Image: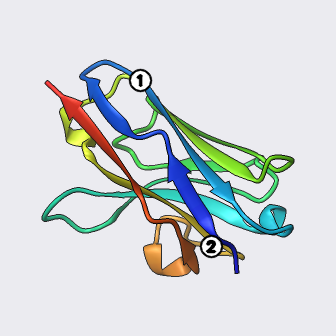
Amino acid sequence: QVQLEESGGGLVQAGGSLRLSCAASGRTFRSYAMGWFRQAIGKEREFVAAISRDGVYTYYADSVKGRFTISRDNAKNTVYLQMNSLKPEDTAAYYCAATSGTRNPQVPNEYSDWGQGTQVTVSS
């Protein structure tokens, strides 16, 4: 089990940028693949991005490809989500999640541990 805490959310104008961080507790962070998901009010939780244990492989939802970048620093037990060219439709609570292994990184049920979320609001 790993405890996760997101930070870095806030209010930004359309076209702006934010960098989310997710700090993980424990010594086993490098054994987990990590994902970012988001949930807007009245909508289901949706996949945003995922990264393999070693950071070599990354996956993105089509809606954020080319604008968002996921990365991780295993020495700091932290995963990041750099968000550029933000749009009002990116407004949501953003969650990081950990999985010990999955062939379907875009599926929320594949993840065993979740953070509490951080709110991102993009104004038009």
Q: How dense is the environment of label 1, judged by Cα within 10 Å: few (below 14), some, or many (20 and up)? A: some
Q: Is residue 111 above or below residue 14?
A: below
Tell me where residue 116 appears, x and y as whole percent: 44, 65
Pick the front one: 32 or 75: 75
Q: Secondary structure at mark 2?
A: loop
Determine whether 61 is above or below 123 in the image.
Answer: below
Q: Is residue 123 above or below residue 60?
A: above
Q: Position of residue 56 (x, y in %)?
A: 77, 46
In the rendering, which numbered label is found on residue 72? none
Q: Residues within 10 Å of mark 2 (few under 14, many from 20)?
A: few
Circles 2 and 1 in contact, beta carbons < 8 Å: no
Which residue lies most toward the top here?
A: 15
Q: Which residue is mark 2?
A: 103
Counting residues from the start of the chain, the first of labels 2 and 1 encountered is: 1
Q: Residue at x 63, y 60 (%)?
A: 34
Q: Position of residue 58 (x, y in %)?
A: 64, 48
Judging by the rendered image, the residue that carries numbered circle 1 is: 17
Distance from disc 2 to disc 1, alpha carbons, whole Å, reads: 30 Å
* Towards the viewer: 96 or 50: 96
Q: Nearer the viewer, residue 62 or 30?
A: 30
Residue 68 at x, y percent in the picture: 48, 34
Q: Residue placed at 69% from the left, 64% from the top?
A: 33
Tag 1, which secondary structure? loop
Mark in front: 2 vs 1: 1
Q: Is residue 11 above or below residue 5?
A: above
Amino acid carrying mark 2 in the image: Arg
* Scheme by which the image is coloured: rainbow
Image position of 112 (left or right of 64): right
Name the side, left or right, on which 27 lies relative to 86.
right
For the residue marked with disc 1, what is the amino acid?
Answer: Ser
- The residue located at (24%, 21%) in the rendering is 13
